[in-house]
């Protein structure tokens, strides 16, 4: 393969790409690009992780490089194999494949030897103090910390104690291993950080083998180095950790991976904390990690979002150096744009109102052609049926219509989508004064595509033929929170859950072409939005989840 020559055009590159191209141009790492995605398997991935996935895999793809998937499994009490499998499924669903699959636990022995090496160099020591005592000695950003009384232990004593920690001779919290750096450093992370702590929790891969586990800061950079990762891309909160990342690599004399930080994704009306998402699940505020209201990738997949839309969203958001909040309406826009091109159209009535076409022959049914997707030139047509009795949306009729109302009203006319013009002649009222049904006249010469009636109407509404309509459950999902930033409000974030985030309609009527729809099949329901078949749907009980409305109505309704 011929060598690529890069000429840096800073106007068209984000700052990470500028760094990568400069490294390639200078011959660093022989022009090699190797990234990694290092999730902790303590929960399901969310939309913020999707941005990181797109960035890491996208960089490698752009520069003919490789990306490793590495599970940061150094915290055994919160990590499960279930999360490992879900993470792999999510990455593949987004359209990416990793070069190698690793676990930080693969390197536990090597990381342990790194720690031993630092002890032998006099750069690490065992501390007997409690976590509270260590924290109290850290000082403040403007005041130096206090050195531990155990900082001067001999190398031999530290080696002995560290080995005994590994053997499980001490209880949890009894001792830790700390790096010996600088208790007066202006960077708090360099004030003798903890490298190892004692934990007796069973690990999802190594079982009870290990009694001590490395801290993230000690395991992460070393894992990057072992894998010879060239560009370790992480979120901005790790910027202050970078000097420690570099310090460990320098003292150990190992492969010099480079950490680069970017602003993580923050969405309004959304919670990104795994801890809080887990709380929503455990307290049954949602049905699970894959609840379609959750910002998890599995929840978004169940709701009907596409990987193409999520990748487009990540690309539009871009890569920034400073934290900002992205409006969730941008994600919804990307979803609409994608689904508009790929989904077939169907007619479904959520709140059925019966209409009797009094001049249509009893017992007769006719089939009419309907476009599957007018946005796609090669889209085929389907047939819909029409007969004497149909269902329309109850909201499409008004007894006392306001000025400018273009739908059906007493004496008024509308066109039925793909069918005929009808006129409302009579309204049948129930004893409770609700509307039972409408009696209408249709105009045979007004058939769509062959209209010879000369009648002009402004309104077009959808319908379903009552003779062959099928029942369906429709779940109307909306934003999980009713305020833009649930984390910044007084009280608990739970106080700001949107009570209207889910509305279940159990008796919707759908055209029969939806009868064989399978889980995750996606459709546009005319005038209603984009919908996806739920995973719990069966041939005898169809369930549809609303993915997104046709237009952004949230601002109009909620930002008055």
Image (cartoon, rainbow, N blue to C red):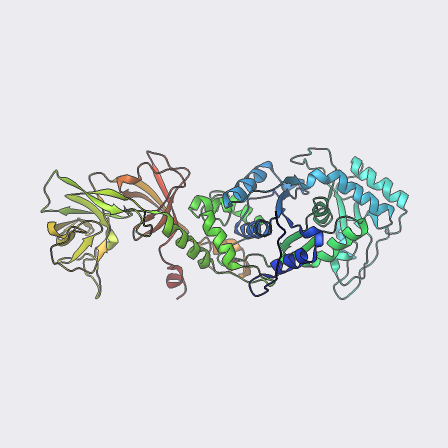
Q: Nearer the viewer, residue 408 or 530?
A: 530
Q: Quadrant of the C terminus?
A: bottom left
Q: Is residue 379 above or below residue 455?
A: above
Q: Quadrant of residue 77?
A: top right
Residue 236 visible within the image = no
Q: Nearer the viewer, residue 91 or 529?
A: 91
Query: In percent of the image, x 79 and y 38: which residue is there?
Result: 166
Image mark count: 0
350 sits left or right of 21 in the view: left
448 sits left or right of 501 in the view: left
Residue 182 percent across, percent down from the top left: 81, 58
Residue 223 visible within the image = yes
Q: Nearer the viewer, residue 523 or 45?
A: 523
Residue 114 percent across, percent down from the top left: 79, 44
Q: Nearer the viewer, residue 120 or 541?
A: 120
Query: In percent of the image, x 42 and y 53: which residue is there?
Result: 335
Residue sitting at the far front: 2
Residue 453 percent across, percent down from the top left: 11, 55
Query: In percent of the image, x 13 and y 54: which residue is there?
Result: 423
379 sits left or right of 261 in the view: left
Residue 347 percent across, percent down from the top left: 27, 47
């Amino acid at each position: 393969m011929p060598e690529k020559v890069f000429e840096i055009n800073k106007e068209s590159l984000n700052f990470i790409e500028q760094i990568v191209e400069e490294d390639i141009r200078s011959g660093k790492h022989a022009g090699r690009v190797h990234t990694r995605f290092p999730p902790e398997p303590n929960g399901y991935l969310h939309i913020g992780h999707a941005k990181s996935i797109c960035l890491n895999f996208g960089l490698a793809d752009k520069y003919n490089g490789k990306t490793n998937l590495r599970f940061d499994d150094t915290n055994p009490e919160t990590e499960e194999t279930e999360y490992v499998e879900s993470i792999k499924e999510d990455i593949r669903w987004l359209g990416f494949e990793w070069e190698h699959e690793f676990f930080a636990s693969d390197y536990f022995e090597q990381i342990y030897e790194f720690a031993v090496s630092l002890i032998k160099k006099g750069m690490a020591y065992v501390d007997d103090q409690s976590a509270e005592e260590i924290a109290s000695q850290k000082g403040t950003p403007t005041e130096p910390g206090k050195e531990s009384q155990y900082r001067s232990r001999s190398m031999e004593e530290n080696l002995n104690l560290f080995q005994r920690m590994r053997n499980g001779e001490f209880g949890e919290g009894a001792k830790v291993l700390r790096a010996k750096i600088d208790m007066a450093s202006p960077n708090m992370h360099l004030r003798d950080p903890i490298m190892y702590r004692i934990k007796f929790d069973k690990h999802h891969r190594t079982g009870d083998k290990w009694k001590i586990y490395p801290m993230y800061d000690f395991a992460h950079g070393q894992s990057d180095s072992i894998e010879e990762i060239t560009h370790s891309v992480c979120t901005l909160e790790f910027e202050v950790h970078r000097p420690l990342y570099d310090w460990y690599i320098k003292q150990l004399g190992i492969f010099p991976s480079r950490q680069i930080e970017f602003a993580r994704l923050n969405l309004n009306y959304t919670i990104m904390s795994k801890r809080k998402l887990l709380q929503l699940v455990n307290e049954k505020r949602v049905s699970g990690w894959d609840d379609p209201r959750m910002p998890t990738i599995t929840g978004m997949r169940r709701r009907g979002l596409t990987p193409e839309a999520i990748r487009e969203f990540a690309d539009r958001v871009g890569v920034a150096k400073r934290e900002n909040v992205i409006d969730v309406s941008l994600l919804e826009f990307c979803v609409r744009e994608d689904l508009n091109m790929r989904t077939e159209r169907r007619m479904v009535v959520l709140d059925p109102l019966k209409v009797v076409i009094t001049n249509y022959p009893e017992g007769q049914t006719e089939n009419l052609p309907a476009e599957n997707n007018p946005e796609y030139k090669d889209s085929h047509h389907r047939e819909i049926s029409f007969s004497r009795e149909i269902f329309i949306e109850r909201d499409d009729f008004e007894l006392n219509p306001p000025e400018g109302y273009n739908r059906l009203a007493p004496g008024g006319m509308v066109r039925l989508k793909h069918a005929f013009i009808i006129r409302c002649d009579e309204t049948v009222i129930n004893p409770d004064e609700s509307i039972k049904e409408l009696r209408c006249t249709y105009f045979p010469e007004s058939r769509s595509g062959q209209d010879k009636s000369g009648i002009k109407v402004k309104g077009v509404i959808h319908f379903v033929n009552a003779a062959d309509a099928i029942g369906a459950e429709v779940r109307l999902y909306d934003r999980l929170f009713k305020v833009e930033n649930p984390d910044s409000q007084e009280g608990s974030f739970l106080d700001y859950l949107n009570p209207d985030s889910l509305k279940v309609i159990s008796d919707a009527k759908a055209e029969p072409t939806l009868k064989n729809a399978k889980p995750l099949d996606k459709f546009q329901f005319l005038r209603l939005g984009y919908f996806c078949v739920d995973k719990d749907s069966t041939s005898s009980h169809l369930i549809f989840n609303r993915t997104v409305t046709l237009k952004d109505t949230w601002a109009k309704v909620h930002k008055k």
